[in-house]
Amino acid sequence: MKILVTGAAGFIGFHLSKKLLENGHEVIGLDNLNDYYAVDLKFARLNRLGIAKKMAQHYGTMNTSSTQPAFKFIKLDIGDRDALPRLFEQENIKVVCNLAAQAGVRYSLENPEAYVDSNIVGFLNLLECCRNHGIEHLVYASSSSVYGLNKEMPFKVTQNVDNPISLYAASKKSNELMAHTYSHLFGLRTTGLRFFTVYGPWGRPDMAMFLFTKAILEDRPIHVFNNGDLERDFTYIDDIIQGIVRIVEDNHTAAYNPKEAYHLYNIGNSKPVRLLDFIEALENNLEKKAIKEMKPMQPGDVKSTWADVSGLEKDYEYRPNTPIDVGVAKFTQWYKDHYQV
């Protein structure tokens, strides 16, 4: 199939594009290459997909050539109401994977406008393009943050999620509501995925694993929020990609029912890990002790996350199987290699 992956220079978008290409699909990668974090890392990911840094910088919204014949990269913002529809008109896209979003809970406290522009206005623009150009399936990223103040564990998609505690979470809940509307009104097949703390090689520099690794290697203190009394459902990137690809490639399996256009799943590891145990795994792999600075709970954060992934297990035989020590070892090795530590 010809598949559009938005956020293709991002962490999950890069890995998904790579896997889809390996599986024989044609991929159009789209990204606005914003400077929320180091753009050099985004260009390094694109380079692995066959796009030269100088070409991505020079061509702007034009297509760039690639050493990977089945991959085309376009620098474009999903909120562009003129350019995005033109792209859909020019390309015979079958499936859209929307991983473009303004990410980060804490950043949403400082720059709320960025979340409305990308996560709501941009998503609406994408929905309209899918509706008007016969897209067979829209798969999009939601977030575990939508569970907000829910106390019942593990988190289930049947739970009420009317208590977000960050604008980022509110914007992701809005995506789910918007997708439901388009599925109901226009029969657009949509699948939302609530991601739970994804980590691994080529990860985001604003995430805990990246921040902690960098600080430990540089003998700087790490900030441990809520005095370390936190749990996260850390999910290795390969397990996440396995789940997404099964959904993207699903057109004829038992999980696909054309009469049910709207679907929503948790995608996580279903094995929450204590933050202090996570830090210990990093210390063991880096062979250095962390200097811990205990901090209070941050606004917008939650104490624990834990995914009930029974829906994906039932419909797609999703089986996350990467233990935290194995995933941490793979990340730290990548970090040392990439940054020549």
Image (tube, grey):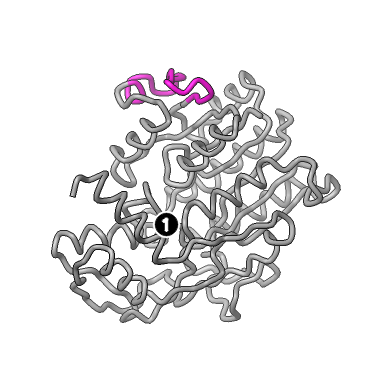
Quarter holding the N terminus is: top right
Instruction: Using the image, determine if residue 162 lies above or below residue 14.
Output: below
Residue 206 in the magenta stretch? The answer is no
The residue type indicated by label 1 comes to Tyr
Side of 222 relative to 84 (left or right): left
Which image quadrant for residue 188?
top right
Image coordinates for residue 29, horizontal then vertical, percent: 50, 31
Residue in the picture at 56% in, 42% down: 98
Horizontally, residue 299 falls left or right of residue 157, namely: left
Question: In the image, is residue 70 part of the stretch drawn in magenta?
Answer: yes
Residue 336, compared with residue 35, is above or below; it is below
Residue at image coords 46%, 23%: 68
Give the residue at x 37% y 53%: 111
Spot occupied by residue 181 in the image (x, y as percentages of width and height) = 73, 50
Q: Which contiguous range is marked in magenta?
A: 55-72
Q: Is residue 102 left or right of residue 331?
A: right
- Tell me if mark 1 has few (under 14), some (14-19) or many (20+) residues whose alpha carbon lies within 10 angstroms of its own: many
Q: Nearer the viewer, residue 83 or 340?
A: 340
Per the image, the residue denoted by label 1 is: 199
Q: Position of residue 84 (x, y in %)?
A: 56, 28
Secondary structure type for disc 1: strand
Q: Residue at x 42, y 38 (%)?
A: 9
Residue 159: image quadrant is: bottom right
Viewer-proximal residue, 91 or 309? 309
**Which one is in front, 41 or 341?**
341
Work out which residue is located at the far right of the displayed protein and give it.
Answer: 259
Q: Is residue 275 above or below residue 124?
A: below
In the rendered image, residue 164, in percent from the top left (x then y), is placed at 54, 68
Determine the residue located farthest toward the left in the rendered image.
219
Depth order, front residue of 154/125: 154
Q: Is residue 37 above or below residue 295?
A: above
